[in-house]
Amino acid sequence: MTAPVKTAKKPNTDNGTRRRKVLGIVEESSQRLTPGELRKRLLGNTFVDEKAIKTAIRDLILSRELKYTYHLGCSFLEKSYEKPTRVSKRVVLKPPGMVYESSSGDIVIDISKGASFGFGDHPTTRLAIQGIEAALSENHGILKADNGRALDIGTGSGVLAIAAVLMGIKRAVGIDIDACARDEAQKNIQLNGLEHRINILDTGVEDIKETYSLITANLRYPTLKRLCSHIAGITQKKGAVVVSGIKSDEVEDLVNDFSKFHFTCTWNKFEKDWIGIVLNHSGSKVQGLTASTSQVKGVRIQQHVLLYQ
Ligand SMILES: C[S@@+](CC[C@H](N)C(=O)[O-])C[C@H]1O[C@@H](n2cnc3c(N)ncnc32)[C@H](O)[C@@H]1O
């Protein structure tokens, strides 16, 4: 009697599995991958030959799930957001004109791809949207407040202001230092029929004196650190600040800065090397905001000091 021949376990190589594998590797990579780097990673996986890899990549490009991008003379394969894409439990971003069959509870936002930031193709935008969702589902006071208003600092495409309003915030204001972003944000607000609820202003953050129950800020760490005391001063009692745009090694310092103004971090999420956080105000009443100006190494520093009850 002959012993049964042991065969190596056949890898699962149907095209659907291959495509999911390719997408998974692209999504999980902390850096953009060139086609060569992607192939190298795939060959060490369940893929058996170059031809199968090429077919899977070609299919993903045809179905607009992957796209070629060019940076500094190098081509890369990246996930494409030029089709309806779910970016949080409830929010789906889509290019205008594309059809998306939504399920109940979905919030579908039309966003035109322009020069400004906020098309959904960057982790910081997605984290900020997830942060707004978390802030509004866990802190119902924000939505119940009669003056439930949001301020979106660095609005870019306007996507966060639009998302906040569609999640239940009554009115929102978006500001941006960039005129092109303000123009594109206005167009996206019109696309979504929200002109009556969102205003885009050419106003500096420091000139904003009204208070808001929700503030969103997808900005880089030095800007957030500089604006921390002012943002704290214009956040309503028990309101929330959604922060994105920071790296994991910057978060502790920023949370510490906000804690000086009675904020605690109630939510956080990582994507690649980025982190989004929600900071909730404890409820100690801010009585006022005073400004003092000092000089450090020739640099004029204006510091806002909050007075608590
Ligand atoms: C990373 S983008 C965020 C865009 C969008 N909010 C999003 O989440 O996708 C940052 C935006 O902030 C703007 N910006 C940078 N510094 C700013 C400041 N001090 N005040 C207002 N806007 C600022 C930039 O012009 C840019 O449009």
Image: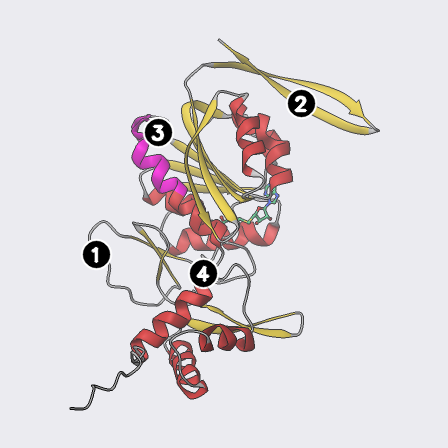
Q: What's under tag 2, amino acid-wise?
A: Gln
Can you identify the residue that label 3 sits on? 142
Q: In this picture, is 94 found above or below 239?
A: below
Q: CA distance from mark 1 to mark 3?
A: 26 Å
Q: What's under tag 3, amino acid-wise?
A: Ile
Label whose residue precedes the other's in the sequence (1 or 3):
1
Q: Residue furthest top?
A: 309
Describe the element under mark 4 as helix, strand or loop: helix
Q: Is mark 4 within 8 Å of ligand 1?
A: no
Specify whether residue 195 is in view: no
Q: Which residues are magenta?
A: 131-145
Can you identify the residue that label 1 sits on? 103
- How many numbered marks are there? 4
Main SS, magenta region, reads helix
Per the rendering, the mark at residue 28 is 4
1 vs 4, front mark: 4
Describe the element under mark 2 as helix, strand or loop: strand
Describe the element under mark 1 as helix, strand or loop: loop
Q: What's under tag 4, amino acid-wise?
A: Glu
Residue 58: which quarter of the image?
bottom left
The residue drawn where x is 41% and y is 53% is 190
Q: In this picture, is 147 found above or below 151?
A: above
Q: What's under tag 1, amino acid-wise?
A: Ser
Q: CA distance from mark 1 to mark 4?
A: 27 Å
Label whose residue precedes the other's in the sequence (3 or 4):
4
